[in-house]
Image: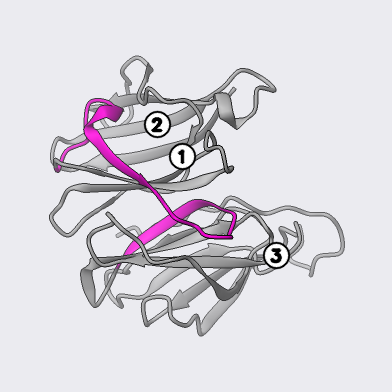
Amino acid sequence: SNQNPLLFFDDTTGTLHLWHTQAPANSGEGGAEVHHLSSRDGGKTWSASERYFHEKGIFIRNRIIRRKDKTLFWPFYSTSQSEGDCPVFAWSSTASVPDNGTGWHSKLLDQGDARLEQPTCWHQPHDTGTVECYFRDCNQKNIYSSSSNDGGKSFSKPEPTKLPNPGSGIEAFGPLHSTEDIVLMFNPTTDEHRDPLAAALSSDGGKTWSRQRNVQDGPTGIPNTGPNEFSYPTVLQTG
């Protein structure tokens, strides 16, 4: 099966890149391979799919961002570690997308006693050299956060935020063009409950999330009364 597609438009080359994981049916994440395609005409036609990373067990989901020096920063996670799943941060030496996985430097996150996956990251509006990352919590309690002051080469010990997380995917985007706010999509619940789906805004780089509303609450907008699921969101700004 093919899973977790990830798009990135490289404005240095005018190329739209698509990565996805691929694994035999029922093989689990440990056997997954990351494959890559590219398009030079905005997605009308695509190159042949080729394996991108040599390692198996890499799982992608959330977006690539540019570092302060315009090189690339890619958060994902590895399922092939002896101690279990672990977030990984990769960065390029060039402003353009490397031809294959050997063009990325990477480092595992020291997650301590936490069990984290699928980091989503942004540049802090007050300092573009500072990268903030939020994480999905496999213990199904809280979103975790960690920050880097060196463009993503090293990160602080992840700590739980006040935002709940039922072990589901999250995604952040920002800073927004007009306000420098950060927007976060997540399930404001715990213990596997993935309804409702909420959007929150932060005006202080993620320290507080004072504005929050449910985007989906039950299948018809009525508060949840059953095992509904609205999860794995993505968010971006247009215009």
Residue 194, how many percent across, how many down? 71, 58
Residue 134, how many percent across, how many down? 47, 63
In the displayed structure, does residue 163 sit left or right of residue 208? right
User: Which class describes the residues within 10 Å of circle 3: few (<14), some (14-19), or many (20+)?
Assistant: many
Instruction: Calculate the distance from the C-alpha at mark 2 to the C-alpha at mark 1.
Output: 8 Å
Instruction: Calculate the distance from the C-alpha at mark 2 to the C-alpha at mark 3.
Output: 29 Å
11 up-or-down from 39: above or below: below
**Labels 1 & 3 near each other (Cβ < 8 A):** no
Residue 200, how many percent across, how many down? 52, 73
100 up-or-down from 119: above or below: above
Q: Is residue 131 magenta?
A: no
Question: Which residue is labeled 2 in the image?
Answer: 19
Which mark is first along the chain, 3 or 1? 1
Which mark is first along the chain, 3 or 2? 2
Q: Does dot 2 land on a helix, a strand or a loop?
A: strand
Question: Which residue is labeled 1 in the image?
Answer: 60
User: Which class describes the residues within 10 Å of circle 2: few (<14), some (14-19), or many (20+)?
Assistant: many
Which one is closest to the eye, mark 2 or mark 3?
2
Magenta stretch: give its range: 95-123
In the displayed structure, does residue 119 sit left or right of residue 91? right
Instruction: Calculate the distance from the C-alpha at mark 1 to the C-alpha at mark 3.
Output: 24 Å
Q: Residue furthest right?
A: 225
Three-letter code, disc 3: Pro
Q: Is residue 121 magenta?
A: yes
Three-letter code, disc 2: Trp
Three-letter code, disc 1: Ile
Question: Which residue is labeled 3 in the image?
Answer: 196
Which one is closest to the eye, mark 1 or mark 3?
1
